[in-house]
Amino acid sequence: MTVKQECSRLNWINLDALEAVDQADDLIAGLKQTPKTLPCRYLYDDRGSALFEKICDLPEYYPTRTEQAILEQNASAIAQMTGSCELIELGSGSSRKTHLLLEAYSQTDQSLSYCPVDVSTGLLRTTALQLLHHYPTLQVCGLAGTYEQALAQLPPATRRRMLIFLGSTLGNLNPQDCDRFLTQVQSALQPGDFFLVGVDLQKDVDLIETAYNDAQGVTAAFNLNALKHLNQQFEGNFRLNQFAHWAFYNPVDHQIEMHLFNLRPQFIFLRTLNFAIELQIGETIRTEISRKFYLPTLISTLERHDLRSLQVWTDPNRWFALLLCQRQA
Ligand code: AVJ
C-alpha cells in the first residue's frame, strides 16, 4: 500500500526534475573547480539527515536550541501577525521546530495545511505520517525535491501563504546563490504573503568553530557521509578513511567552511557518471559553507527582493535571529 492510500489528508509529490538533478551537472562542475566543492544537498541522504538530527542535540551546536527557544517564545505572536495561512517549509527535515508553529496555528486555524519540502525522502515520509497522526485535521502535502524545484513548481496558492526557512539554511548559499534563491522566494509569494527565516548571527569565533568541531565527532561523520552517499549513488570509490574533517571560520566571508581534507593521493572514479578526478595529498573538497549574518545587511538584502521585515526576534545573547518578512506589492 502506498502512503497516499493510507490517509486522505496526505498528498505526495515527487518533484519530477529530481532525476535531472541526479544527472549531477553541478556535482561534476564543483569537482572540477579549484578548490573542489560539493553541492551541499549530498550531505542529506537519509543517513546524513539522521546525523544532522544528532548534531542538533550536541552541546556544542547552539543554533538549533537557540532558534527553538525563540520559536517557543514567539510562535503564537507569529500566528497572530500572519493570521490563517498555508505553511510551506523548505528543508523541513524532522519538522521538530515546526511543531511549535503548527501548535500555534492549530489554535485558530481549522483548515491548517502544511507542505514540507525535503530531498531526504525517507525522513519526509516518516515526518509527514507523524504529523498527520498528531494533528487530526491537518492537511499535509509532502514535496520530495530540492528548494529550487519546489519553489518553481509549487501548487497554485489558494490563500495566504507563508514560506518557512529555518535553521540558518540560508547561510549555506553564497551571496550570489542567495540572491537567486530570494528571487525565487519572491516569485513564489503574492504581495501580502509571508517569509519566515531563521539565521545564525556573527559572534565570537571560538563559539562558532566549536559548534562545527564537536567532541564526539558527529559533525565529522556527517561531513564524511557525503562521500559515502556519492559512492552509493554513483558507484564511486572515495576511501572515507583517507579523509579528515576540517571546519574553520573564514572571517573575510563571515562563514564556516566545512571541508574534507585528503590525506593520501587518490584516484577517484564515479562509475555511473563516467567521471574521474585525481586528488592530491592535502587537497580539500569543500562540502558546505555556513554564513553568519549581520542583521542590517540581511534586512536590506531581503528588502531588495521586496521582502520587508515586519519583526525580528532574537535570543538574549543575540546569537540567532528569526525574521518575519512580508512580500511587498
Ligand atoms: C542546517 C545547514 C544550517 O550550516 O549549521 C551543521 C548544517 N553543518 N553542522 C549549518 C551543519 C555542520 C547546518 N545547516
Image: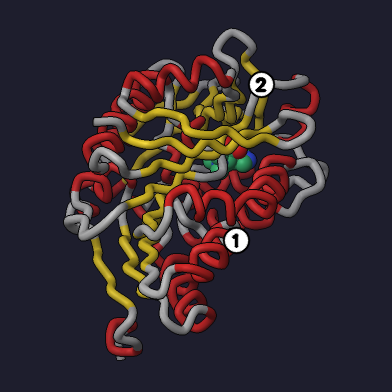
Residue 120 picture quarter = bottom left
Q: Residues within 10 Å of mark 2 (few under 14, many from 20)?
A: some
Disc 2/disc 1 C-alpha distance (Å):
26 Å
Instruction: Please give left or right for residue 89 compared with residue 99 in the image.
Output: left
Q: Is residue 215 visible?
A: yes
Q: Nearer the viewer, residue 327 or 226?
A: 327
Question: Residue at 79% across / 41% down in the picture?
Answer: 60
For label 1, the residue is: 100
303 or 257: nearer the eye? 303
Instruction: Residue at 38%, 47% (x, y): give it.
Output: 163
Q: Is residue 260 above or below residue 148?
A: above
Query: What residue do we see at 38% from left, 22% from top?
Result: 303
Find numbered disc 2 in the image and state the secondary structure of the residue it sits on: loop
Visible residue check, residue 242? no
Q: Position of residue 70 (x, y in %)?
A: 67, 45
Question: Which label sits on residue 202?
Answer: 2
Image quadrant occupied by the N terminus: bottom left
Q: Quadrant of ligand 1?
A: top right
State left or right for residue 245 relative to residue 312.
Answer: right
Please provide percent x and percent y for residue 97. 59, 57
Going from N to C along the chain, the mark reached first, 2 or 1, is 1
